[in-house]
Amino acid sequence: MIRGQVELLELDETPEERAETTRLVLDELDRLSRMVDDLFLLARAEHPDFLRPDRVKVATFLVDLHRRLSTLTPLALVADVPDGLVITADPHRLAQAVTQLVANAVKHAGADPRVELGARVDDGELVVWVADDGPGVPVDEAPRVFDRSHRGVAADRGGAGLGLAIVRAIAEAHAGSARLAPTAQGARFELRLPLTATSSQVAPHVSTA
């Protein structure tokens, strides 16, 4: 594809046409570069040094991440976790996974998207979830949505289709899991991480619109 676009430069007759062809070439190079980066990350996920575990104060982590991501898109934080909850995790990789879920939600939501970031404790696990009000995941795609080889709606829209595979790889590196959760509208993706370390747990309260 890139070769064909470069060859078109010789046929472009105006500066505007050459500028548009150049833009297309650069966009394609950027897309391929992101794909290579994603494949490299997935390969690294199988190595023992993929994670740099640290003590993560969950409530603080969520508030900080919400603040950063809210500069990119309207994002509601609807979390219910103990203020003193601490887990052992790689904060950079965990933020990377949640950011990917938010980006995925924005991509598939409507023109005026409503995206929510939430968290709760469930059966010995921290559940971090991202929900949107879009059309949801087609039934035939749902079982394969985290597969590396899956090329569904994301790929049709110009993506490489590796984002959710990266989310699952990060979750599994933490001895956790990622799943598409049932919901009445839109799509809801969950990261489930074991509570490997906790501190004093006081009354739950984190809620920011």
Image (tube, grey):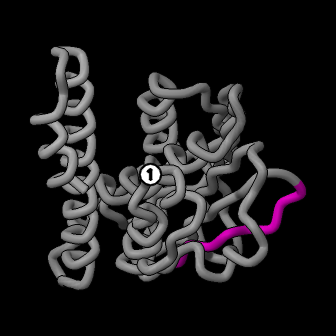
Q: Residue furthest top?
A: 15
Work out whether 164 lies above or below 9. below
Report x, y in % for residue 184: 89, 57
Work out whether 131 lies above or below 49. above
Q: What number of labels is visible?
A: 1
Q: Residue furthest left?
A: 10
Disc 1 crowd, CA 10 A, few/some/many (<14, 14-19, 20+): few
Q: Is residue 16 visible?
A: yes
Q: Quadrant of the N terminus?
A: bottom left
Q: Is residue 205 visible?
A: no
Going by the image, does 174 lie left or right of 15?
right
Tell me the chief SS of the magenta region: strand
Given residues 126 and 197, the one toward you in this image is: 126
* Residue at screen point 64% across, 36% down: 77
Given residues 76 and 105, the one toward you in this image is: 105
* Residue at screen point 54% across, 27% down: 73
* Residue at screen point 39% across, 68% down: 166
Report x, y in % for residue 161: 45, 64
Going by the image, does 41 lie left or right of 57?
left
Instruction: Verify whether residue 11 appears in magenta.
Output: no
Q: Which residues are magenta?
A: 177-184
Given residues 162 and 68, the one toward you in this image is: 162
**Mark 1 lies on residue:** 158
Q: Secondary structure at mark 1?
A: loop
* Residue at screen point 66% across, 28% down: 208
Work out whether 43 lies above or below 86. below
Going by the image, does 37 lie left or right of 179?
left
Going by the image, does 24 lie left or right of 117?
left
Work out whether 199 lies above or below 194. above
Report x, y in % for residue 163: 43, 61
Amino acid identity at mark 1: Gly
Report x, y in % for residue 82: 62, 51
